[in-house]
Amino acid sequence: MGYITLTREGRDKLVKELEFLKGEKRREIAKALSEARAHGDLSENAEYDAAKEAQALNEKRVAELEDVLMRARIMDESAMSSDEALLGARVKVVDKETSEEFEYMLVAEEESDFSENKISVSSPVGKALLGHKKGDIVEIEAPAGFIKYEIVGISR
């Protein structure tokens, strides 16, 4: 597979998550498995089944993060245009219909987090904003219809 471009902040966040999952989370799961085993018959032990499921999900996420981090490249923000909506840019937009203002940071899919207004460049909004400049109007197809945003600011 190819490289994944991440912001330094995004890479650091993934590294911390991986450390947590490999350390504290693995210890929690091991403790839960041990306690469940102490209850006896494992064939009808719901706590044991739940702990095994948690272990499988944790190990799956560990593998995903290790893969992403192995393929990750940190983007060089100093070499990027500050007037174009590119990966790593903070883009301020105004909804042309409601006049609401939003600010999004364009990031790779692996570090998107809508609660922090970090949207993937592969999302509908991210794709629509990518490559545009301040003053451009972009139209985004959403489930509820089309949304028109005017880009009113771009920063790094």
Image (spheres, grey):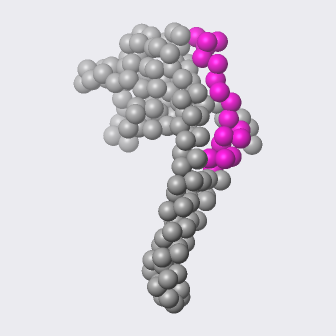
Q: How many marks?
A: 0
Name the residue located 52 percent from the left edge and 81 percent from the top edge. Answer: 37
Closer to the camera in the image, 31 or 74: 31
**Position of the N terminus by quadrant:** top right
**Left or right, 121 with reference to 75:** left
**Left or right, 54 with reference to 75:** left
Name the residue located 54 percent from the left edge and 49 percent from the top edge. Answer: 20
Residue 132 position within the rendered picture, expressed as x and y whole percent measured from the top left: 51, 16
- To which quarter of the image does residue 7 belong? top right
Residue 138 position within the rendered picture, expressed as x and y whole percent measured from the top left: 43, 21
Residue 50 position within the rendered picture, expressed as x and y whole percent measured from the top left: 48, 73
Decide if residue 136 is in sight here: no
Decide if residue 2 is in sight here: yes
Name the residue located 37 percent from the left edge and 32 percent from the top edge. Answer: 146
Residue 93 position within the rendered picture, expressed as x and y whole percent measured from the top left: 37, 20
> Furthest-left residue in view?
98
> Furthest-right residue in view?
1
**Image vertical order of residue 58 relative to residue 46, above or below:** above
Closer to the camera in the image, 86 or 133: 86
Magenta residues (range)? 64-81
Closer to the camera in the image, 33 or 121: 33
Our reading of the magenta stretch's main secondary structure is: helix
**Image vertical order of residue 34 relative to residue 137, above or below:** below
**Image vertical order of residue 46 relative to residue 67, above or below:** below
Q: Is residue 149 magenta?
A: no
Q: Is residue 79 magenta?
A: yes
**Image vertical order of residue 130 relative to residue 40, above or below:** above
Closer to the camera in the image, 147 or 129: 129
- To which quarter of the image does residue 99 belong? top left
Name the residue located 39 percent from the left edge and 18 percent from the top edge. Answer: 92
